[in-house]
Image (cartoon, helix red, strand yellow):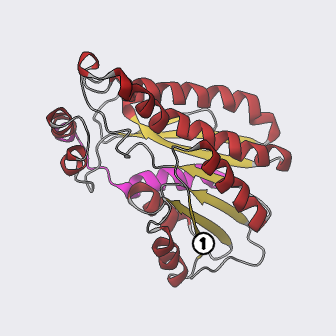
Amino acid sequence: MTSPAKTPARVTLVTGGSSGIGKVVATRIARPAEHVVVAGRPGGTAQDVADEIVAAGGSASAAGADLLEPKQIKDLVDGVVAEYGRLDHLVASGAGFSPAGLHFKLFTDMDPADFPGVVTAHWLSKAYLIHAALAHMIPAGYGKIVNISSDAGRVPTPNESMLGGAAAGMMLMTRAIAREVGRQGVRINTISLGPLADVDMVRLAQMSPSGEASVATAQKLTSRLLFPVTASDIAAAAEFLLSPAGDNVTGQTISVNGGVSTT
């Protein structure tokens, strides 16, 4: 079931939209006159999320792509533009919670063979998406991109050296791109987060190849929350950046972390 508006005021692509933060963002920003493309892994549940949006009166469709594969990402973005004639907004979520990105270990305990997967999950997946989106946004003279990333890119955290390094690289890349494309009408920002109160971080950590180190890290970070942060809080920040109220914000990293860090 899909229901694209005949002439949508905006077309927004949300990756990682079949579950977690991406799903909450997609459902929150859906508007009857604006179309949301919910992207998830091929064969996943993105269509179910699109159906929920349509049932609630919004306009949505589903698409599939592996965010670790640059060709699939380019085909995803190009396909959205081919079908709807435009791409106004991109919310780049997902990939970081893939098995490739869930390596929580001391640097000296890591296998160097795992380095590329972490970097791709937390940095290059966003770079692929941004590059593909800008090819359409710059000629259109308008676009907004919101990356969802980890506060490990801002705060040095034991067991997150590679994850944090990749996230920090993505954040610096984002700031540089913002300077490059601002005069073409494109804004790009990052929302960084710590543990979420409505996500079982320990269960998620158990999916990691890093084993007990991941569980210990998740437990420690969760215990440091001063205020509970949920996926809805991240979605609210994304909604602000995509709205006219966020028009004058670009090149920024906004932490929504419940006080885990104030750096």
Magenta segment main secondary structure? helix
**Closer-to-camera residue (94/58):** 94
Instruction: Kindly indicate the quadrant of the structure image that contains residue 216.
Output: top left
Whether residue 241 sits left or right of residue 183 in the image: it is left
Residue 72 place in picture, x, y as percent: 61, 51
Q: Secondary structure at mark 1?
A: strand
Q: Which residue shows up at 23% across the image and 20% down it? A: 109
Residue 47 is at least partly visible in this image: yes
Residue 263 is at least partly visible in this image: no
Q: Residues within 10 Å of mark 1 (few under 14, many from 20)?
A: many
Residue 248 place in picture, x, y as percent: 67, 41
Instruction: Kindly indicate the quadrant of the structure image that contains residue 80.
Output: bottom right
Q: Which residue shows up at 71% across the image and 63% down it? A: 10
Q: Report the residue marked by disc 1.
A: 61
Query: Is 38 rendered above or below residue 168?
Result: below
Residue 40 shown in magenta: no
Residue 52 place in picture, x, y as percent: 47, 78
Residue 230 shown in magenta: yes
Q: Which residues are magenta?
A: 222-247
